[in-house]
Amino acid sequence: MKRYLILPVLGLTILPLRAQEKVTLTIEQAVGIALHESYTVRSNDENRQAMQYEYLYYKAQFKPRLDLNLFTPSWNEQVSAIAQTNDLPVYNSTSSIQFGGDLKFTYVLPTGGDLSLMGNLYHENLRTTFARDYSTLRRKQAFSQFGLIFNQPVFTKNKLRENLRVAQYQYERSELFFTRTQMDIVYSVTKGFYEVYKSAYEKQINEEQLRNAQEALRIAQLKFETGNIPEGDLLVTEINALQSDVNLSESIGKHELQKDEFKLLIGMDMSMEIDIAAEMDFETVAIDLQTATEQALANRLELKEGEYDVKLQEIEIDRAKREREIKGNIYAYYDFTGLSTQPGSVPALFRSSFDNFAMRPPNRGVTFTLTVPILDWGRGRSIVRSQTIRLKEKQLKLENTSSLIVKEIREIVRTVHEAEKRFRINQKNKDNAANSYRIARLRFENGDLSGQELATEQERLSQVQLAFINAYITYQLALADLKRRTMWDFENNKSLSLTKN
């Protein structure tokens, strides 16, 4: 049996949390929480456990079984028709009440049949009321039976082993799907984490923009009081300051919304206050397209799931073929029966029924049944063809999935390279835009630049800063997506394959 685990592979730990507590989360801690508390993981884990117990159910079918049935009591009163020679039937009233039960030990044979050792004991009170004179007869009796029963299907597949194999394939496929869900959660949490980081960064940009606008307004007011700028420039700087204040309020609301969505994603209490801890470290990661493609084709769980789908469909074809096959069954039994009607206590009746074993010949018999299909007007052939076509469909889907994975990896690798280049360009642009704004503010202070022109420089700086953070996040998400889709850590040059024997 294979197990698919993700926390040990990624080296994640769970952060203990308490309600009403503000916590600062790293991306590793957030992923660890999500892999235990998120709705998606918990829901899929329930499905995985259900498939596991279904597999264990079919596995237990091969183990012996002991069953006890008790009837305490079984009571019947009814009118029975009694046929008479040369006369109409009469209707007697009969009554019986039984106390007893049966015990059966069943051993499942490796061939798909079973061998049972059974025992049956019951005490019965009988009463009959005759229709002619309504006289009544009563009798107490004890019945005992012990014997062996053998049952074996022949000329057909061992259905127990087949059902076990189907349950195993379905369980292992559910394990694969659960692991894939975990990997998707890791990426989703990474994406959500950087969305919160981006909104926090935007808030910082707007805070800086507001400070710059307020400083520009202060300078403009001083210059207006000394008559160095017209009133129009003062109004422009005042409008820019007010608009910057509005932008900051909007970014604060957006940041709080992103944090709430992130808490919902990872399964945290919505009442908890969170902050995130992230550093904008940028290291170039060497990515080889051939290695990425090979690792994806070797590790992608969709391919393994597709292989299980093919195996399950092959079993369905085999089952379809058996719809019109020759089937046989051997049934044999050998038992001893004792019956006692002698007057006495209940224990005496049972002892007498045991003594009756020696006087009464045993019950035994063998039955061999054979079912031979003759004509079904093509029904069996049609179902086989239907299941065969479904197999081809699943095989084509598996082949297409492989091709899609190759295309997907090529696209992600290109995205990583493009994002890296875009980040370096925007990093340089950010530094240049910051220097340009400082120069523009000095020119504004010296009266060489209008308030509108300064606002334009501020807007350009904000746009470049946003482009910088977007490029950084795009690069980090592309790396995370590549790791998820190849199961290979290019930063540490090691495999993240989750399969364990």
Image (cartoon, rainbow, N blue to C red):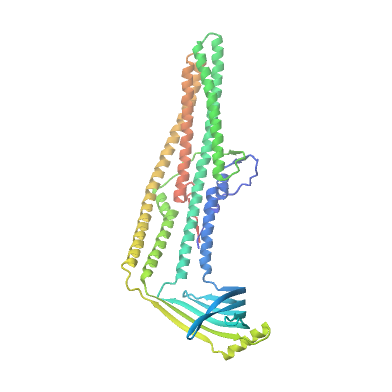
Tell me the residue at 45%/70% (across/down): 159
In this rendered view, identify the residue nearer to me: 250 or 281.
Answer: 250
Residue 242, image quadrant: top right
| Residue 371: % across, % down | 38, 76
Residue 350: quarter of image: bottom right
Please say whether residue 340 is visible from this viewpoint.
yes
Q: How many marks?
A: 0
Q: In the displayed orientation, state which residue is furthest to the top.
A: 227
From this viewpoint, which residue is outermost toward the right?
Answer: 345
Location of residue 440 in the rendering, given as x and y in whole percent from the top left corner: 48, 20
Vertical comparison of 44 with 78: above or below: above
| Residue lying farthest to the left in this orientation | 377
Question: Compared to 295, does 76 lie above or below?
Answer: below
Q: Is residue 200 visible?
A: no
Going by the image, does 94 lie left or right of 460? right
Q: Residue at x 36, y 60 (%)?
A: 391
- Above or below for 493 versus 392: above
Q: Where does residue 352 sit, x and y in percent of width and height?
A: 64, 87
Would you say 399 lies left or right of 437 here? left
Residue 76 position in % (x across, y down): 59, 74
Depth check, front residue: 398 or 110: 110
Residue appearing at x 43%, y 38% in the figure? 419
